[in-house]
Image (cartoon, rainbow, N blue to C red):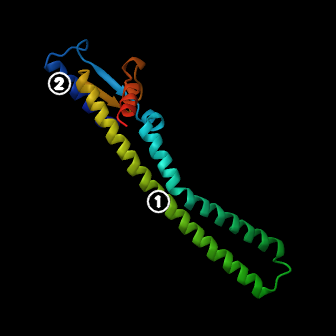
Amino acid sequence: MLKAKTLVFASLLSALCITGVTAAELKVGYVDTQRIFRDAPAAQKAAKKLESEFSRRDQELQRMAKQLQGLQEGLEKNSVTMSESERRTREKEFGDLSREFQRRQREFREDLNLRQNEENAAVIEKANRAIKQIAESEKYDLILQDVVWVSPRLDITERVIKALSDAK
């Protein structure tokens, strides 16, 4: 992956050199996508939407977890005084509930991840439109995302967040 990025960057630089563009003429910008996901109003709105969408299921899972904990404590505390058949019945009840809890928890995580990916894709799409608009209006030659290090003077993330705020 790193080799591919290095190769793309080297190719870009050589193409710029061939066309006669000097580093002084090159206008480069950088966007911090993690900051967009954290600070952009569209991302915050998406997070609140997901929270409200999944809060009921999360509360149900928490209720089931408490119920499981209560059953387990009851088994540990009273297993010596219970009859063999009662103990087996309670252990079966605990096992059934535990499997159901794990199934629901897995489904919850899968559904949440799917919805997070959908919402993140929508935020990225809006951000990319804003980045393209800024690049065209301010005549950027290159805008990078997700780099190892960049000078703060090249960071245009705040302008992208503002453009996303204005585009409500």
Q: In the picture shown, does residue 135 fall above or below 97?
A: above
Query: Looking at numbered disc 1 in the image, what kind of residue is underneath it?
Result: Glu
Q: Quadrant of the C terminus?
A: top left
The location of residue 18, given as percent across then percent down, is: 14, 20
Residue at point 69%, 68% (across, down): 67
Does residue 161 appear in this view?
yes
Q: Which residue appears at 32% of the width and 23% of the height? A: 29
Q: Nearer the viewer, residue 30 or 60?
A: 60
Q: Which residue is under mark 2?
A: 15
Q: Position of residue 81 (x, y in %)?
A: 86, 80
Q: Image point 52% across, 57% down: which residue?
A: 54
Q: Secondary structure at mark 2?
A: helix
Q: Is residue 64 above or below residue 9?
A: below
Q: Nearer the viewer, mark 2 or mark 1?
A: 1
Q: Position of residue 83 (x, y in %)?
A: 81, 86
Residue 121 drawn at (x, y percent) = 36, 46
Q: Residue at x 65, y 75 (%)?
A: 95
Q: Residues within 10 Å of mark 1 (few under 14, many from 20)?
A: few
Mark 2 burial class by Cα count in 10 Å: few <14, some 14-19, many 20+: few
Looking at this view, name the residue that lies furthest to the left: 19
Kind of residue at badge 2 = Ala
Mark 1 falls on what kind of element? helix
Quick check: 38 above or below 27?
A: below
Picture quarter containing residue 137?
A: top left
Quarter holding residue 72 = bottom right
- What residue is disc 1 on? 110
Figure quadrant of residue 26: top left
